[in-house]
């Protein structure tokens, strides 16, 4: 019965597929597409607003079309516009009263237009324009932007224009300003008077990134109260002491003084940093800088700093008794040249909650007890640093880190683990040991004290999965990554292995050279919703070993599966799915039922576009199969025919009898 039904449905679904396919022809992109509250007409070579756009449109995306000039008639009928994007439409002239009839316009993107002229009443009409982008629009001076009608502007984005000075800032009314982006212009000086328009504002972000300043008046930023200030990549023509003198008196949450790879080297003298005694900042970025004469008082004016980013600052040590950073909570020392974790001299930073020495350019030794004053540390990232504890890890090295929640030792050097290696960090929630290799000395349950651990990444770590005690104690574990740990014997039979991790939700066992697993291995994992068994050597899709398929996402991509028994996927629930991409699936009648199921359950098949018939470029959903009816259907039809025939004969005989009774009367 079922296969008959299947056959019937397949006829309809193929017909349906054909109809749908016919409608979505590739040359159909002659219409704007409807999006929420609006239309997307991007990149259609349009020279005017097409008639199909209703007057009531609120959002219009119209970039990459051709509108060399905007007139008062261009958008006239679109009276409900709130957001208009005319990026790269070759606009050179914006004439009078273009938006007179758009009182609700709030967002206007004029990015990438070679503007030559903007009429003084170009922006009259909108009651409260909030976001104006003139990115890469060849604007030469701020006074070329008609400021009359921009009183409610929150964001003015002028990145990559041709602006040479801040003249004209005072024409604007900035009372609602949140962000002014002047990145990559040609501004070379800033005076105290230039910035007076911002003196009564608070919480504004200003970016001067990538301008080559020559002169900033000392105290130019005096008494400004900003949210963030970006002066990264601005030191090609000016030294940092002049810049910092200009910033004296400012208060800003974030200050970026970093450089980029294309910038010339900058050497910061400790004396220059004296200016920080008059700068109030909580988050400071010195990426790619050089420190000329780092000593224990270099940072002494940075008392109060919360976050310091010294990524690639050419450091091989921080000074032993640094003064001034005692309130620091985040310290980033990535991509430097430390020899030992101890050279970070973290005793100076007792309030630290986050420390990162990732991507160190040298093999990083991890000596004992050098972080022991960091009793508040929550996250320690020593990844990609070939971190190398010379003695068995990790209790001596992590001594004192009782509050640690995240430890990243990925891409480290091979190491030995002492018994209970994480005994001093019992509050760990995330442990990443990917691409690091460890050897257990004499304890088969290294994690048994980690009752709060939620994520454990042991991918590519030579983990021995025949040790059934490995995960003992991990009561709260939700995500376990075991990718790239080859299974001896290629069959996972250790049914005890996952018994101690009852809350597991995600399990990655990809690239483990597995051919099959014991039916009972995963049965106890009631919360499992992701299992990744990709890049193994399975020849069969086996799903009977899981607690439930209601919400399970199965990944069997890149295995050796040729045919799939449709019964193994039939029970996948609404939230369940299967990924069989890059398997050598055969597209002949042996797989007819499965392929048919796929066509009906596209949402449950992940990476469908990469799921091919082996050896051909055909996707299995495009496979055209002409298969004889299965034997079941034939039998069913035969029985049905027989029943119909029998009842017909029966009725006929009854009629004939009745008739003959009547005629006999
Ligand atoms: C558009 O501008 C022209 C010329 O300035 C004017 O004659 C016309 O009335 C304006 N149209 C509208 C709808 O404002
Ligand atoms: C600066 O502005 C913030 C609001 O963004 C405010 O909380 C703070 O008190 C202001 N500080 C000064 C010194 O004005
Ligand atoms: C920085 O530049 C200013 C102005 O050019 C100059 O007076 C000053 O000596 C320079 N300071 C340093 C440390 O080079
Ligand atoms: C730190 O270096 C600066 C500049 O070289 C020097 O003036 C200062 O005396 C040094 N401080 C200490 C405590 O050595
Ligand atoms: C660092 O400070 C400690 C105590 O504050 C002191 O005992 C030690 O001598 C100092 N070391 C240096 C090199 O100044
Ligand atoms: C800084 O270093 C100098 C000499 O190197 C030393 O005399 C001074 O005590 C140190 N300062 C602190 C706070 O440790
Ligand atoms: C550990 O560091 C690596 C490399 O920096 C990164 O990819 C990974 O996401 C980090 N792990 C965690 C848990 O943050
Ligand atoms: C680990 O081995 C060492 C030396 O072989 C031994 O002293 C220690 O008791 C062992 N620890 C455990 C937990 O077995
Ligand atoms: C290890 O796995 C965790 C959780 O799946 C993930 O967040 C982290 O990025 C992985 N680490 C690496 C180095 O890929
Ligand atoms: C389908 O192809 C496979 C592998 O090529 C073959 O073993 C099987 O017999 C074929 N089935 C049918 C019904 O042709
Ligand atoms: C899949 O196709 C490749 C290349 O055509 C062929 O070598 C291989 O034997 C096929 N595998 C199966 C299982 O049919």
Image (cartoon, rainbow, N blue to C red):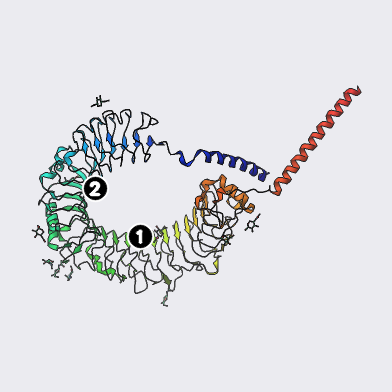
Q: Are marks 2 and 1 in contact (CB under 8 Å)?
A: no
Across and down, in percent, residue 48 comes to 34, 33
Most extreme residue toward the top, as rendered? 665
- Marks counted in the figure total 2
- Where, quadrant-wise, is the N terminus in this rendering? top right
Across and down, in percent, residue 119 comes to 20, 33
Toward the viewer: 317 or 424?
A: 317
Q: Residues within 10 Å of mark 1 (few under 14, many from 20)?
A: many
Q: Is residue 606 visible?
A: no
Write down the quadrant of residue 113 in the picture.
Answer: top left
What residue does disc 1 label? 406
Indicate which label's residue lies in the foreground, 2 or 1. Answer: 2
Of pointers 2 and 1, the one earlier in the residue sequence: 2
Q: Identify the residue at horizontal 18%, vertical 45% (top origin).
A: 163
Toward the viewer: 548 or 453?
A: 548
Ligand 11 - quadrant of the structure image: bottom right
Element carrying mark 1 = strand
What residue does disc 2 label? 160
Across and down, in percent, residue 387 comes to 34, 69
Is ligand 7 less than 8 Å from the beta carbon at label 1? yes
Q: Is residue 190 visible?
A: yes
Element carrying mark 2 = loop
Q: Is residue 133 above or below residue 306?
A: above
């Amino acid at each position: 019965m079922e296969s008959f039904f299947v056959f019937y449905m397949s006829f309809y679904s193929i017909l349906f597929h054909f109809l749908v396919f016919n409608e979505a022809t590739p040359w159909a992109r002659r219409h704007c597409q409807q999006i929420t509250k609006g239309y997307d007409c991007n990149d259609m070579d349009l020279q005017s607003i097409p008639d199909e756009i209703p007057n009531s449109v609120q959002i219009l995306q119209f970039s990459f079309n051709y509108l060399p000039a905007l007139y008062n008639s261009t958008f006239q009928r679109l009276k409900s516009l709130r957001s208009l994007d005319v990026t790269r439409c070759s606009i050179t002239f914006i004439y009078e009263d273009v938006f007179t009839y758009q009182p609700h316009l709030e967002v206007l993107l004029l990015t990438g237009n070679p503007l030559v002229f903007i009429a003084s009443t170009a922006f009259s009409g909108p009651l409260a324009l909030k976001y104006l982008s003139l990115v890469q629009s060849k604007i030469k001076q701020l006074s070329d932007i008609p400021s009359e009608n921009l009183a409610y502007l929150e964001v003015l984005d002028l990145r990559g224009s041709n602006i040479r000075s801040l003249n004209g800032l005072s024409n604007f009314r900035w009372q609602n300003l949140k962000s002014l982006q002047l990145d990559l212009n040609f501004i070379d000086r800033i005076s105290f008077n230039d910035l007076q328009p911002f003196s009564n504002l608070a919480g504004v972000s200003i970016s001067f990134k990538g301008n080559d300043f020559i002169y900033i008046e000392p105290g130019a930023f005096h008494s400004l109260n900003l949210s963030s200030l970006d002066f990264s990549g601005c030191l090609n023509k000016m030294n940092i002491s002049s810049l910092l003198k200009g910033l004296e008196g400012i208060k800003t949450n974030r200050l970026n003084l970093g450089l980029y790879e294309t910038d010339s080297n900058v050497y910061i003298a400790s004396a220059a940093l004296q200016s920080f005694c008059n700068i109030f900042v909580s988050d400071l970025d010195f990426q790619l800088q050089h420190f000329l004469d780092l000593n224990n008082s270099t940072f002494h004016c940075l008392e109060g700093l919360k976050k310091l980013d010294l990524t690639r600052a050419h450091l091989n040590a921080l000074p032993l008794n640094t003064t001034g950073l005692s309130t620091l909570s985040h310290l980033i020392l990535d991509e430097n040249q430390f020899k030992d974790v101890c050279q970070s001299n973290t005793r100076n930073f007792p309030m630290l909650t986050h420390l990162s020495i990732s991507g160190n350019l040298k093999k990083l030794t991890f000596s004992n007890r050098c972080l022991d004053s960091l009793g508040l540390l929550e996250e320690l990232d020593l990844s990609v640093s070939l971190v190398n504890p010379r003695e068995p890890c990790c209790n001596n090295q992590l001594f004192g880190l009782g509050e640690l929640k995240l430890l990243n030792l990925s891409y480290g050097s091979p190491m030995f683990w002492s018994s209970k290696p994480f005994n001093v960090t019992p509050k760990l929630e995330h442990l990443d040991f990917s691409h690091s290799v460890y050897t257990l000395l004499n304890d088969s349950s290294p994690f048994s004290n980690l009752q709060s651990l939620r994520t454990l990444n042991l991918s590519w770590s030579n983990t021995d999965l025949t040790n059934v005690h490995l995960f003992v104690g991990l009561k709260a574990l939700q995500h376990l990554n075991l990718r790239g740990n080859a299974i001896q014997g290629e069959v996972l039979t250790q049914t005890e292995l996952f018994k101690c991790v009852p809350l597991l939700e995600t399990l990655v066992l990809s690239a483990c050279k597995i051919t099959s697993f014991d039916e009972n291995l995963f049965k106890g994992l009631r919360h499992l919703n992701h299992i990744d068994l990709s890049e193994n050597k399975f020849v069969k899709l086996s799903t009977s070993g899981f607690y439930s398929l209601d919400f399970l996402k199965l990944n069997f991509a890149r295995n050796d599966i040729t045919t799939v028994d449709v019964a193994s996927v039939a029970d996948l629930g609404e939230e369940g799915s299967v990924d069989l991409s890059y398997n050598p699936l055969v597209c002949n009648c042996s797989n007819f039922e499965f392929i048919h199921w796929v066509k009906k359950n596209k949402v449950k098949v992940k990476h469908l576009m990469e799921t091919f018939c082996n050896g051909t470029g055909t996707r299995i959903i495009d496979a055209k199969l002409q298969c004889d009816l299965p034997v079941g259907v034939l039998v069913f039809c035969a029985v049905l025919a027989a029943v119909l025939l029998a009842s017909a004969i029966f009725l006929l005989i009854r009629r004939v009898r009745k008739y003959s009774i009547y005629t006999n009367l």
